[in-house]
Amino acid sequence: MRRPFRKRSEKAGLPPGTMVHIGEQETEQVRIHIIDYDDGHYQELEAQSVEECFPFRDTPTVTWINVHGLHQPEVIEKLGTYYGLHPLVLEDIVSAGQRPKMEDYGDYMWVVLKALYHDDKEDETKAHQVGIVIGRNFVMSFQEAEGNVFVPVRDRVKNGAARIRTMGSDYLAYSLMDIVVDNYFGILERLGEQLEVMEDRSVTEPEPDTLQSIHDFRREMVFLRRSVWPLREVVARLERGDSSLIQKSTAIYFRDVYDHTIQVIDTIETFRDMVSPMLEVYVSSVSNKMNEVMKVLTVIGTIFLPLTFLAGVYGMNFKYFPEINWRWGYGFFWVINLSVVIGMLMYFRRKRWF
């Protein structure tokens, strides 16, 4: 089950900037992938050590350093220290569960966002932290887990036919954020289908499993809202182009990411509004179902009430009973009973009670 809050007690009382990994170990070891490119140059390699990233700091080309895994603070610290990252940034990198945010440090910017994915094994939506450092000629991305969310961007850089090879590091950062936000729509489509099924089941099949599904869905909406809502402010700051690291030509593309973020937030709010009254619909359906059961039992009890009365009267053990010696008394008793049953059924039918 997803943990809504990460344990941060291990950092209590430590000085600011102390690097303590918070979160689960999602990879066996930290992997560093390097891509260096410009319009006519492309180089890709899998770094065996942090030192292999150092020569790319001062190159005129654009360098993308993608780090998988945050559970080895010493690796992150060595890389960040060489590239001049602030200790508080290094602390945030290894602390999974950060709120989406953007901080401008002048020579570079630090951006945190959430990459959402659906866990088929546990059948729930989960999130991995993605941190992006935007420099003048480099971009460093830090992924909590090893995934394929950035594969389309890597393919675009490798093919060389896209605009990304002629643009700077700010456009690369836009591409990484854009692919993360676009993946939100796939999650929302799945949740929309799930919501439609729950709407039908809450009316036609008000079972305990349906109630559990409604509660699980409401938890997912809270989780998604916490993961996506702060991203609107982050992208808005990038879109305004207040930093010298963001070119005016690239700010237009961040505006597109901002529009997509607003669409995602609006969809999440719509889902929340739809699931909120669903619990009331479920309770009403259960009540209606119970009323139908009680109606059937009431009709049956009402029918047997006069029959019980007649059976009680003719079951009395008096010696002198007027109809006891009548030859057709037994048959006449059943005729009366059947007439009462048929008469009551016709009356109930006319009143449309069943």
Image: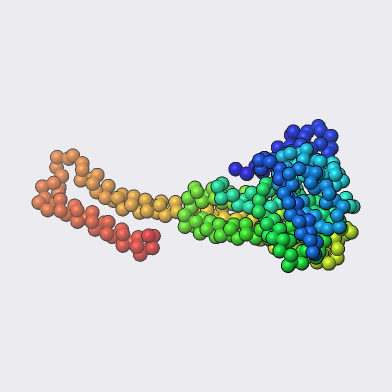
Which percent across, then down, holds residue 342? Answer: 27, 59
Residue appearing at x 76%, y 36% in the figure: 20
Which percent across, then down, holds residue 101? Answer: 79, 51
Q: Which of these two is toward me, 107 or 332?
A: 107
Q: Is residue 115 visible?
A: yes
Residue appearing at x 18%, y 39% in the figure: 317
Taking the image as shown, residue 313 lies to the left or right of residue 146, namely left
Q: Which of these two is toward me, 281 or 60?
A: 60
Q: Please determine whether, in this image, residue 111 is positioned above or below residue 163.
A: above
Q: Which of these two is toward me, 73 or 53?
A: 53
Q: Please determine whether, in this image, residue 138 is positioned above or below residue 30.
A: below
Residue appearing at x 71%, y 51% in the figure: 114
Q: Quadrant of the C terminus?
A: bottom left
Q: Please determine whether, in this image, residue 302 is positioned above or below residue 267.
A: above
Q: Is residue 238 visible?
A: no
Taking the image as shown, residue 239 lies to the left or right of residue 276, namely right
Res 183 quadrant in image: bottom right
Residue appearing at x 76%, y 56% in the figure: 43
Which percent across, then down, holds residue 205? Answer: 47, 54
State the scheme by which the image is colored: rainbow
